[in-house]
Image (tube, rainbow, N blue to C red):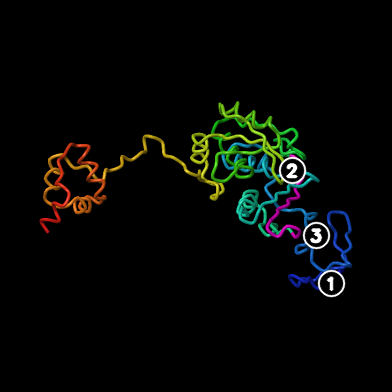
Amino acid sequence: MLTNVRECKKCGAGIPNFVFIGDKRQRLYNRQYCLHCSPINSHLKITQAVNHTIFDKVDTKQKAYWLGFLYADGSTASGRISIYQAKKDASLLYGFANFIGLDTGRIRERHSYPNQMHLQVGCKKLVEALQTLGVVPHKENSMRLPSLGSKELDLAFLLGFYDGDGTAGSCTVACGNSGFLVDIKSRFGLSNKISYRKNEWGSSFELGVGRELFRDMLANYAGSLPRKRFIKNDKKPPQEWKKRKKKFDPTREELGALVWEMSLVKVGRHFGVSGNAVKKRCTNLGIERPPVGHWAKKG
């Protein structure tokens, strides 16, 4: 029989002297938190209930999207899946946890980085399936674009990768391996050049996928990160352009009559423009205007 010797500082649950994890006995004499609340990663050793067969076959857009996201921000080092995200993008962690059937209580703040959240999943079968698909430790050295069998799945995969390593408001994706971007160019028939960029966080290769392809990505899968579902200064295609109504487009006869009935300033107010605009239009149309001082004399 296990005896509880203290209470967890966070949830108040009793902490036993030891627990069995599998066939191994783990001592808990010096614990101040229970295994669920522990800020240390001991809770990861407990078997977690997830759908471990979900990536055995990538046959839906949702699976392709999350695979692309893991290619960008996921890791399978040390036999577990690890994902780190800024707090503003924590919805990605909750979305992935719900996708694989994991309790969202596993999502935690990083103690060393208060503005970040992290999710770690210990499931050997799920890790093996992802490694087969290319999500391997140190994948940036050998990562290549996987073949998913259809354009729809490829677009969903690319959108997932963009949500992980894309620049919000642009059509640019970044990767530490230029070969992966070369594969994207080849798969989608892009002519844009791959550039090399160095910043305070390191260096990477970048590729602009273009507005047309980016629109196809968004139209193909609607469940992506809302913060990145737009392009700065995006222009509508020509078929969606609206003809702008001209504010000031009177006929020659109409304008010629008005300039002799009222001053240029009043004519401009009538059309919602300045008096100088009326003067220019009269000059362009060859309309004779009242001489200077005409309206002062009449007043």
Residue under label 1? 4
Residue nearest the observer in this picture, 92 or 35: 92
Mark 1 touches mark 3? (CB < 8 Å): no
Question: How far apart are the alpha carbons under marks 3 and 2?
Answer: 21 Å
Question: How far apart are the alpha carbons under marks 1 and 3?
Answer: 20 Å
Which residue is pictured at 63% across the width and 55% down the height?
Answer: 90
- Residue 153 x %, y %: 57, 35
Q: Earlier in the sequence, mark 1 or mark 3?
A: 1
Determine whether the residue tagged by mark 3 lies in a helix, strand or loop.
Answer: loop
Q: Earlier in the sequence, mark 3 or mark 2?
A: 3
Residue nearest the observer in this picture, 135 or 195: 195
Residue under label 2? 127
Compared with 71, 226 (above or below) is: below
Which residue is pictured at 76% across the width and 50% down the height?
Answer: 122
Q: Magenta part of the protein: which range?
A: 111-128
Residue under label 3? 40
- In front of the other: label 3 or label 2? 3
Question: How far apart are the alpha carbons under marks 1 and 2?
Answer: 35 Å
